[in-house]
Image (cartoon, helix red, strand yellow):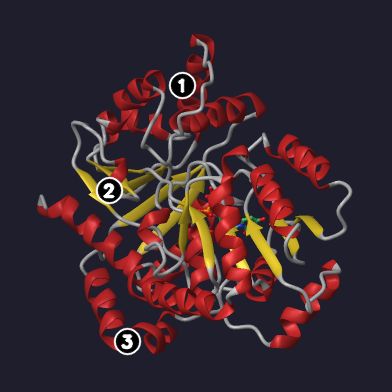
């Protein structure tokens, strides 16, 4: 069980009591059902971020939600990272032997894990093969895809399709990811928790003390990207943007992120980022340990502009986190990001380094314009991407499995 300091009732001050009453009503209809979430890591990345909050809030609504992770060795996670990259359209080769090893580890987990439950909610490709148990166990199986599915490598897609189509339902984060699949598809966007340490209000003293800890100057503009060190987040591109903007105006760049236990590529990317940043004292490359939520919160709040220059993005929780803090955001128009940003209304969408340089200069030169974008952005996140909406969508999904909905 995860213990959380926030109580579900506290959310009424943000979203209204009606929403909370509705959650209790829906949750009551799931009485006696065990919902077992399975993914591949408890630490790092958006999936773990959401599950950490979601499970505890479901428990408070008296839903018996549980969360397990599959076990795998380095070889397994190297293969799943390759699959992840391939699904995002990156050109990688996965051998037959690797596909076989992927199956082997999934089947080993299928033998070792606890499968008591009513609904098996399987997150992302890593544990996807567990659905083979459906034939013997029965019950309801849902596959929750958090990755950007716009241009997957067909070979990997064809392999995964064999398993996706065994599920009762598949959930995607954005309409752009819908595909021709023989399985009912549901659209549910991710969310942020406004009361978590990552997103709660902080005092100016708390924010300043984090800046001080990292040696960041609060009197000069701060441009930040928070992300795992992953090529698909384009940290090197961010450094290039910063260097070009810096020729025109003074600013600092913060690239902060940690690793995820299911992402073996992080160390290599971090090394490259450090090399690219090497001789500039105004670039802060921060490798954050797990549980750095308050630090991330403070860095986002202290920033003049937040960047998310991803090349692919399932959703991009960091965008929602920044907008919730009423920060102007410039982000790539990829994956789930355009759901969060309407260009020049609730933030800026870009397609290139040139575009990002152009708009970063504009937002730094025109803080009033940037402020307007940020205010609209916060409103949009409040109306669409808070965890209460996400819980409601999940409860309705679970109920639909029994009502043929
Ligand atoms: N995050 C974190 N520590 C880090 C880097 C990222 O806690 O060092 C969080 C970040 O604040 C966000 C999540 O991890 O909540 C990343 O989710 P996102 O959807 O942006 O990207 P993903 O990592 O899932 O590709």
Q: CA distance from mark 3 to mark 1?
A: 46 Å
Q: Is residue 113 above or below residue 152?
A: below
Name the residue tied to disc 3: 16
Label 1 SS: helix
Under 8 Å from ligand 1: the CB of mark 3? no
Q: Nearer the viewer, residue 223 or 344?
A: 344
Label 3 SS: loop
Front label number (3 vs 2)? 2
Q: Can you give x and y, in whole percent of width and height, for residue 397 in the image? A: 23, 56
Furthest residue to the left?
A: 404
Front label number (2 vs 1)? 2
Q: Nearer the viewer, residue 247 or 363?
A: 247
Name the residue tied to disc 1: 103
Q: CA distance from mark 2 to mark 1?
A: 29 Å
Q: Can you give x and y, in whole percent of width and height, for residue 41 in the image? A: 57, 45
Crowdedness of circle 1 by 10 Å Cα count: few (<14), some, many (20+)?
some
Classify residue 39 as left or right of residue 142: right
Residue drawn 72% across and 61% down? 248
> Which mark, residue 175?
2
Q: Is residue 218 above or below residue 123?
A: below
For marks 2 and 1 on the same chain, the one whose residue lies earlier in the sequence? 1
Residue drawn 51% across and 27% down? 90
Q: Can you give x and y, in whole percent of width and height, for residue 374 in the image? A: 49, 75
Label 2 SS: helix
Whether residue 259 is visible here, answered yes or no, is no
For marks 3 and 2 on the same chain, the one whose residue lies earlier in the sequence? 3
């Amino acid at each position: 069980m995860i213990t959380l300091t926030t109580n579900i009732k506290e959310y009424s001050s943000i979203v209204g009591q009606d929403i909370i009453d509705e959650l209790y009503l829906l949750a009551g209809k799931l009485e006696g059902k065990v919902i077992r979430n399975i993914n591949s890591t408890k630490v790092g990345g958006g999936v773990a971020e959401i599950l950490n909050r979601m499970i505890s809030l479901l428990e408070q609504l008296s839903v018996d939600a549980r969360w397990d992770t599959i076990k795998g060795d380095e070889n397994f996670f190297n293969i799943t990272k390759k699959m992840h990259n391939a699904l995002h359209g990156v050109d990688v080769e996965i051998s037959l032997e690797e596909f076989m090893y992927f199956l082997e580890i999934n089947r080993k987990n299928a033998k070792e894990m606890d499968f008591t439950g009513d609904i098996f909610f399987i997150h992302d490709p890593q544990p996807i093969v567990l659905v083979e148990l459906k034939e013997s166990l029965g019950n309801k199986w849902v596959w929750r895809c958090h990755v950007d599915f716009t241009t997957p490598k067909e070979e990997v897609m064809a392999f995964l399709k064999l398993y996706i189509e065994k599920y009762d339902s598949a959930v995607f984060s954005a309409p752009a990811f819908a595909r021709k699949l023989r399985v009912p598809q549901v659209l549910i966007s991710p969310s942020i928790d406004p009361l978590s340490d990552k997103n709660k209000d902080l005092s100016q003293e708390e924010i300043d003390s984090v800046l001080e800890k990292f040696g960041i100057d609060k009197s000069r503009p701060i441009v930040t990207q928070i992300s795992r060190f992953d090529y698909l987040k384009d940290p090197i591109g961010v450094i290039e943007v910063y260097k070009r903007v810096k020729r025109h105006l003074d600013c600092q760049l913060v690239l902060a992120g940690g690793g995820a236990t299911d992402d073996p590529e992080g160390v290599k990317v971090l090394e490259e980022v450090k090399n690219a940043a090497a001789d500039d004292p105004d670039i802060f490359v921060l490798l954050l340990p797990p549980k750095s939520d308050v630090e991330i919160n403070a860095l986002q709040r202290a920033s003049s502009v937040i960047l998310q220059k991803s090349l692919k993005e399932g959703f991009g929780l960091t965008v929602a986190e920044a907008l919730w803090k009423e920060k102007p955001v410039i982000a790539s128009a990829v994956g789930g990001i355009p759901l969060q940003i309407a260009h020049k209304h609730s933030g800026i969408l870009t397609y290139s380094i040139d575009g990002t340089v152009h708009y970063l200069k504009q937002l730094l030169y025109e803080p009033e314009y940037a402020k307007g974008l940020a205010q609209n952005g916060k409103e949009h996140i409040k109306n669409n991407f808070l965890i209460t909406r996400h819980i409601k969508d999940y409860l309705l999904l679970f109920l639909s499995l029994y009502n043929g909905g």
